[in-house]
Image (cartoon, coloured by chain):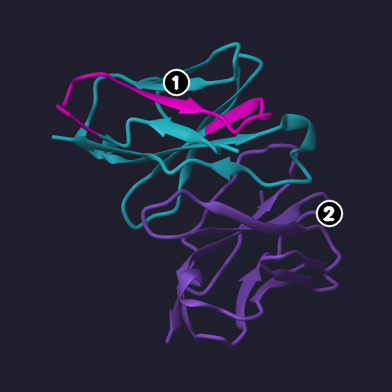
Amino acid sequence: DAKTTQPPSMDCAEGRAANLPCNHSTISGNEYVYWYRQIHSQGPQYIIHGLKNNETNEMASLIITEDRKSSTLILPHATLRDTAVYYCIASSGSARQLTFGSGTQLTVLP
Amino acid sequence: DAGVTQSPTHLIKTRGQQVTLRCSPKSGHDTVSWYQQALGQGPQFIFQYYEEEERQRGNFPDRFSGHQFPNYSSELNVNALLLGDSALYLCASILLATGANYGYTFGSGTRLTVV
């Protein structure tokens, strides 16, 4: 699976959009970009994934650049409950193992 | 709808002992993966079970073994415990046929402390 790079930490004001970047410059054509988050003392939670088109669900939006070398997870209206470590993972899907990096610690400030 | 259930939630063991952790996957899921998460780090893949067989394995020694039962539940066994085995052990499940279209569902984990 391709290596991903994320900033170690970010802050966001409550009610504002949180934009979390991820670089995956070596991603291959059959690899999806998955996002998970882990709230303290809980297991990771699946957020969203995409291959090359932008995706949106009830939790977030995923914007993937045309060359697929980077992506951005957008939480449109961050709340205090969105404070968590966010992981960006490149995987070929089909229930392949997930390779977690260090992730981005997002802190939503009141 | 119950998600992934893991037991016990916390466990303290002594070096050299053996431990068994248990996982019940989300209803409708047939594949179970186990991860180890040391403090301050991301989860690391241990192995995955499907159709009662180990299908994928990460870089973990043979002291780590597992089992999947006909009802899809799974166990993780660790022999000859080391202090370094202290970690949060996470179980994740998925329906294999939809693997590319959905994410894994994770349990809340078992916190293992080796003293």
B73 relative to B98, above or below: above
Q: Which chain is purple?
A: A
Q: Position of residue B55 (x, y in %)?
A: 63, 23
Q: Is residue B23 magenta?
A: yes
- Asked if labels 2 and 1 touch by Cβ distance under 8 angstroms, the answer is no
Q: Position of residue B106 (x, y in %)?
A: 53, 43
Question: In front here: A46 or A9?
Answer: A46
Q: Is residue B15 magenta?
A: yes
A80 relative to A88, above or below: below
Q: Position of residue A49 (x, y in %)?
A: 73, 57
What residue is drawn where x is 55% and y is 70%? A6
Comparing labels 1 and 2, the label whose residue is closer to the camera: 1
For the residue carrying disc 2, how many other residues have a C-alpha within 10 Å: few (<14), some (14-19), or many (20+)?
A: few
Residue range (magenta): B11-33
User: Of the numbered discs in the image, which one, if any, rests on residue A29?
Assistant: 2
Residue carrying label 1: B75
Question: In front here: B51 or A57?
Answer: A57
